[in-house]
Structures are given as C-alpha cells and as structure tokens.
Amino acid sequence: MNRFLCALVILLLCFSCGELVPNPDENPNNITRDSSEKTEEKQQEFAIVIHGGAGTILRKNMSPEKEAAYKAKLEEAIRTGYEILKNGGSSLDAVEKTINVMEDSPLFNAGKGAVFTNAATNELDASIMDGKTLNAGASAGTTTVKNPINLARAVMEKSEHVMLSGKGAETFAEEQGLEIVAPEYFYTENRFQSLKKIKDKEKTELDHDAKTAFYDPMIKDSKFGTVGCVALDKNGNLAAGTSTGGMTNKRYGRIGDAPIIGSGTYANNATCAVSSTGWGEYFIRAQVAHDISALMEYKGLSLKEAAQLVIQEKVPNLGGNGGIVAVDKNGYMVMEFNTAGMYRASMTDGGEITIKIYE
Ligand code: ASP
C-alpha cells in the first residue's frame, strides 16, 4: 500500500512539473515563449518595418553627420509607406514606394549606391511577394533598370514567370515602360573605392584561391545597405520586398538571397512578411524568410520566436550573419539581427516611429 501511495505521489509530481519544466526534446533550442505574443488579437490595424542593411556598423566609424543622413533617409522612406497604408493603400504599394526612396539614395546598396562587382559593374537583384495570393516576382543581375523593385513587381503582375535575369529582364523592363538608365547611373565614388580596396588587398595576399578571396571578412562586411520593407495593410494583406546590389567584388554572375523567394523575401497572409539582409549564400542555404514563416505555420511559434531561432541560431551555426525585418498578420513587428548593427525603422498605425542603427 505504501509503495502504491509513493508511486501515486511521484506520478502526480511528474504531471504538475510538466508545465514548469519544458521537455528539452520539445524545445531543443530553448526558446522562451512569450505568451503575450501568442495572442491572436490584432495589435495594429496596419504596420510597416524597413531595413537598410546589416553588418559591422559601429558607432566609432560613423560621423554624426553620416548618422543623421541615414536616419533622415530611413525616416523619409518609412513615412512614404506609412502614408500609403494610412490612406487605405495596399501593402504592395507601400513596400514598392518605400523601397524606391532607398533605391534612389546613394546611401544604400540598392539602386543608386549599389556595390561593384569584380568586373567593376553594378548588377542588381530584387524581389517582392504578395502575402494574399502568394504571387511573387524577382529580377537578378540587371544593370540598366533604375528601380529593380519595380521590375520585380512587373514580373509578378505582368508576366507568367517569377524570376527574370540579366538581358532578358532588362528587355522585359523596357517593354513594360520602366525607367531605364545607363549603367553609369549606378556609379558612386565610395562604392568604387571599396572595390578598389578589396582588390588591392587580394593582390597582396599570397595564398588566396577564388573562394577565400570572395569570402574574405573584409568583403563580407563591405556590402552594407541592402534595403527591404515589410508591411501589413488595413485589409489584412501582408507584403515583403528586398532590393540590393549584392556583395562587393562578386563574380561570375553571382546572385544572392535578395531575389530568391523564401530566402531574401517571403510573405504569407497566414503568417508573416519577411525581408532579409546579410551574407546571401547563408541566407539561401538557411531559406531564412520562408523558414520563419514555416516555423509559425507548422510549429506554432510566434514571429519573435521564429525570427530568433533562425537569425540567432540557424544562420550563425552555418557560419553566416545578417538580419531580418518582419511583421505578422496581427501587426506585430520584429527587427532581428546577429551583427553589430542594422539600419532599421518601424512605424505603428498610431504613427509611433522607431529608427535605429546599432544594437
Ligand atoms: N544579402 C545581400 C546579398 O548577399 C547582401 C546584403 O544584404 O548585405 O546579396
């Protein structure tokens, strides 16, 4: 009898601890759940988040003037999208127009301000996704389209394809009446000097095969400024977009994660919208943007939990770095990165604005 009682007490204790002590197998990454985020309640009627690239952005390397210029441009960009959303416009329009502001600024590695390839050209990538229809469009390796995000949207809406590249993408852009510029339009002196510096460094290195030269830490950090935007509109539709010049010194027609749906960009009204920035090869391998959505859809994680798992564990465990901005279907916003900084801004439906650069 005593033995029976003991067993019963032990059994009862086990049951009561089940809630308090998580089974490590069920939570292998030890992500703490924030129950306030699990709520299905709408947090915002509409919301918008942007990034202007992640990397080793350190306060000590930044002059007050430069910092102010970045913050002013981030604010101009996000307010553009905010106004569209506030007036009942679509999340797709907000994403496209917000990204246009950053593409037209030489501060960011997208549009004007794109980094240089090894051949001293500028080859631009972009993508956009509609969370309502799961339709998507992307362009890769273009050299003459002023605003690649507009081309990505045209591919999504006006072609039966998802991704166009190089000359074909440029022909399509012309046919669609998009603004075409001479390749020299993308020249900026400081991006050109970055390429020169990297190439000089390569020359002085005795032992460098093509791979180590490409993955040189200096190279991986000279790509800041990819831009991205995610938004939720008043109709509950999510959209995401990303635009970039890629990585300085890239070769052989290299394409990064930015135009890859599921890596650089993903949106699904059932879960969230995500835009990535970082070392593209790792973001492709980790399928960052879709992975975050899938963790929410199939595992029931909150946006924050999913973003933390992918950005703080999965990507760095592979050896990559970078960050994302995301918004979920309830307007909950996340800006997650594993680098020293990420140019970023968010705005709530009430107009509350946050603009940050460092951790
Ligand atoms: N993800 C971009 C690429 O790899 C670069 C960046 O975000 O900084 O092309």
Image: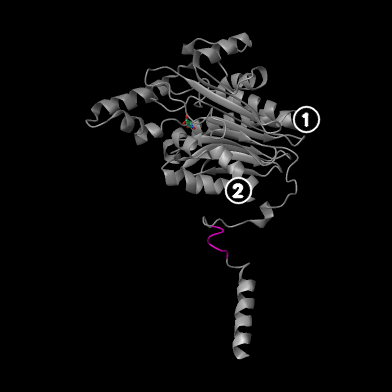
Image point 42% across, 36% down: which residue? 61
Does the magenta portion include 23? yes
Q: Which residues are magenta?
A: 22-27
Local secondary structure at mark 2: helix
Q: Which of the numbered marks, if any, corresponds to residue 88?
A: 1
Q: Please report whichever mark, 2 or 1, sits nearer to the chain's N-terminal start.
A: 1
Q: Which of the numbered marks, if any, corresponds to residue 343?
A: none
Image point 53% across, 13% down: which residue? 168
Question: Residue 329's quadrant in the figure?
Answer: top right
x, y percentage for residue 236? Answer: 75, 37
Does the magenta portion include 125? no
Res. 122 visible in picture: yes
Observer-side mark, 2 or 1, equals 2
Residue underneath mark 2: 304
Local secondary structure at mark 1: loop
Res. 303 visible in picture: no
| Residue type, label 2 | Lys
x, y percentage for residue 111? Answer: 53, 21
x, y percentage for residue 288? Answer: 53, 39
Q: Residue furthest left?
A: 206
Q: Is mark 2 within 8 Å of ligand 1?
A: no
Q: How would you rate the neighbour count of disc 1 (Cα within 10 Å): few for under 14, some for 14-19, many for 20 or more?
A: few
Q: How would you rate the neighbour count of disc 2 (Cα within 10 Å): few for under 14, some for 14-19, many for 20 or more?
A: many
Is residue 90 found left or right of 284 in the rendered image?
A: right
Could you tell me if the residues under marks 2 and 1 are in contact, i.e. CB atoms within 8 Å? Answer: no
x, y percentage for residue 80? Answer: 67, 27
Q: Main secondary structure of the magenta part?
A: loop
| Residue type, label 1 | Gly
Question: Residue 321's quadrant in the figure?
Answer: top left
Of residues 102 and 297, which is closer to you in this image?
A: 297
Give the spatial CA distance, label 2 vs label 1: 27 Å
Image point 52% across, 38% down: which residue? 287
